[in-house]
Amino acid sequence: MFIHNRLGMLESVETMLAQEQRLHQVSNNLANVDTPGYKKETVTFGEMLYNVNRTRQRVGKALAIDTVHQQGVLQQTENPLDLALTGDGFFKIQTPAGVRYTRAGNFQRNALGMLVTSNGYPVLGAGGPIEINGDRVEIGPDGRISVDGLLVDQLDLGTAAPEDLVKEGENLFRLKAGAAEVAPERLVLQQGYLEKSNVNTVMEMTEMIDLYRAYEGQQKMIRASDELDDLAVRRVGVLAG
């Protein structure tokens, strides 16, 4: 009975750790509910068989973090440097670590006239970082950029299979090693709009409540197992006497 109780406690601890990871993702989603272009994350749970020692195996908990690339709602801002994408595709950004991808189109012009992200990373066009020297900026549905009526560049847009994209912070994605970028299809750009986060606040709050109850249930299971161990020890002591 003691061995079985220890296994039950181990299962409960593994479940609590997995629920804690899911709670972290829910909290992160809620924290980014107002972040333009943010894509929410989910945690999927599974089981894995692994060797405890040379003669025994056991089933343990496994989890994977997935990004939901569902389209967010577009919000009109009237800011000519705010851009939103509809369809599968990303803006390409130059960072110190290399080219990265983002759906956040809240761009601005820096002191050098370059189009940059809110973190200061240059936005890439057909010829490299985009420079805007003028007053009236017009960006078409295909990404062509005109300044004061003259065509100056075109946004460099790209995409990849969702499983080939890795989220790495600052609302940016990178390609997995060996993955290839592909040309986006059915992609439309809208100037003066921003894509909002695809986080549903009500659903995430409901998930947080469910996680709390599940976590609380596992705590009760651990207490019950501990009480069974205590009862077994006391009975053995009585029999021995």
Image (cartoon, rainbow, N blue to C red):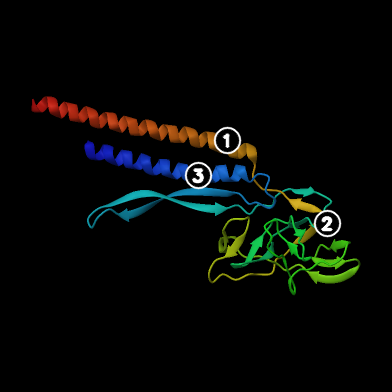
Q: Residue at x 61, y 42 (%)?
A: 30
Q: Nearer the viewer, mark 2 or mark 3?
A: 2
Residue holding disc 1: 206
Q: Please state the horizontal and vertical placement of residue 16, each as a whole percent of the image.
A: 41, 40
Q: Quadrant of residue 82?
A: bottom right
In contact (CB < 8 Å): disc 2 and disc 3: no
Q: Secondary structure at mark 3?
A: helix
Residue holding disc 3: 22
Tell me the distance, in whole angstroms, between the alpha carbons under discs 1 and 2.
Answer: 37 Å
- The reply, left or right, for residue 237 in relation to residue 26 is left
Q: Residue at x 80, y 71 (%)?
A: 153
Mark 1, other Cα within 10 Å: few <14 / some 14–19 / many ≥20:
few
Residue 80, disc: 2
Residue 88, disc: none
Q: Nearer the viewer, mark 1 or mark 2?
A: 2
Q: Residue at x 66, y 65 (%)?
A: 159
Q: Quadrant of the N terminus?
A: top left
Image vertical order of residue 156 relative to residue 198, above or below:
below
Disc nearer the start of the sequence (1/2)? 2
Q: Please state the horizontal and vertical placement of residue 76, each as a whole percent of the image.
A: 81, 49
Mark 3, other Cα within 10 Å: few <14 / some 14–19 / many ≥20:
many
Disc nearer the start of the sequence (2/3)? 3
Tell me the distance, in whole angstroms, between the alpha carbons under discs 3 and 1.
Answer: 13 Å
